[in-house]
């Protein structure tokens, strides 16, 4: 039996199994048919048709397993591993793009900009000088310790904060990129005791990765129909 490394997340698209290694911040792909066969030998794997099998896998499956073992996606022992469960996350059915039309832009004030810049600069520094796995661990730890107090909120109540963030974002000198902007929004909302979910998604043929911030079924910083074309691979 083989085991999924605890720093790896994965999902299944139509044509592939895609793995995200948060330690090295890299993706690996495996043909869906190969993954379905390989999953018979991996602890906790949800193969569509088969349960765990004993004995050695066929040669072609063994080669696929060894490639994943070589990249530390799979392991030979259960140390620092987890059950191989594909990421599941609720599909978005709405977004908040309309609030930027319904609410006038908030004129910047010194106190508001100071708070925004402090959080935005922090994410900028962390992205430049800390490994990706540290950012993931930071969000996971914060939600585990504080989220029970800030995970229940309704979208209308945070609309002013979202308008603030969107209004002040052009003042921060960094290109618009989904990773930075999603992390910055998560950090900004955490400063107000609010902890939405940061979702990473992928699609194949061609491969593309994206991330966004979501609360319940509502996307907070993108269009729900656009992110709906991605399969969630990690939600933290």
Image (cartoon, rainbow, N blue to C red):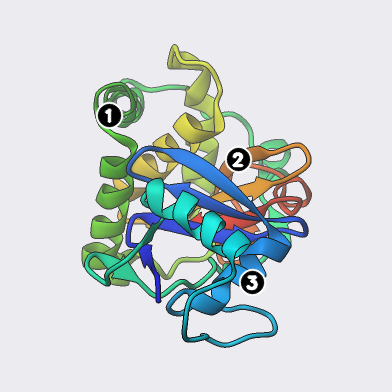
Residue 65 is labelled as none
**Distance in Å between CA atoms under marks 1 and 2:** 19 Å
Q: Position of residue 103 (x, y in %)?
A: 64, 39
Q: Secondary structure beneath disc 2?
A: strand
Q: Is residue 147 left or right of residue 2?
A: left
Q: Which residue is mark 1?
A: 126
Q: Which residue is mark 3?
A: 37
Q: Quadrant of residue 143?
A: bottom left
Q: Secondary structure beneath disc 1?
A: helix
Sequence-first disc among 1 and 2: 1
Q: Which residue is mark 2?
A: 210
Q: Residues within 10 Å of mark 3 (few under 14, many from 20)?
A: some
Q: Is residue 222 left or right of residue 198?
A: right
Q: Position of residue 106 (x, y in %)?
A: 52, 29
Picture quarter with the C terminus? bottom left
Q: Is residue 230 left or right of residue 110?
A: right
The residue drawn where x is 56% and y is 78% is 40
Q: Nearer the viewer, residue 116 or 40?
A: 40
Q: Position of residue 191 (x, y in %)?
A: 29, 45
Q: Nearer the viewer, residue 229 or 124?
A: 229
Q: Residues within 10 Å of mark 1 (few under 14, many from 20)?
A: few
Q: Position of residue 131 (x, y in %)?
A: 28, 34
């Amino acid at each position: 039996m083989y085991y999924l490394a605890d720093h790896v997340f994965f999902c299944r698209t139509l044509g592939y199994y895609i793995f995200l290694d948060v330690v090295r911040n890299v993706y690996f792909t495996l043909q869906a048919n190969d993954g379905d066969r390989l999953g018979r030998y991996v602890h906790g794997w949800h193969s569509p048709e088969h349960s765990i099998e004993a004995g050695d896998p066929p040669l072609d499956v063994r080669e696929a397993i060894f490639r994943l073992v070589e990249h530390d996606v799979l392991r030979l022992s259960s140390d620092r591993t987890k059950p191989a469960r594909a990421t599941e996350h609720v599909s978005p059915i709405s977004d908040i793009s309309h609030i930027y039309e319904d609410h006038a832009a908030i004129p910047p004030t010194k106190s508001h900009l100071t708070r925004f810049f402090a959080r935005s600069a922090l994410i900028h520094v962390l992205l430049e000088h800390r490994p990706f796995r540290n950012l993931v661990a930071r969000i996971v730890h914060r939600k585990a310790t504080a989220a029970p107090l800030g995970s229940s909120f309704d979208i209308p109540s945070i609309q002013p904060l979202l308008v603030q963030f969107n209004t002040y974002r052009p003042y921060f000198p960094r290109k618009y990129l989904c990773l930075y902007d999603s992390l910055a929004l998560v950090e900004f909302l955490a400063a107000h005791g609010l902890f939405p979910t940061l979702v990473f998604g992928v699609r194949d043929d061609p491969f593309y990765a994206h991330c966004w911030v979501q609360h319940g079924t509502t996307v907070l910083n993108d269009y729900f129909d656009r992110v709906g074309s991605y399969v969630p691979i990690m939600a933290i």
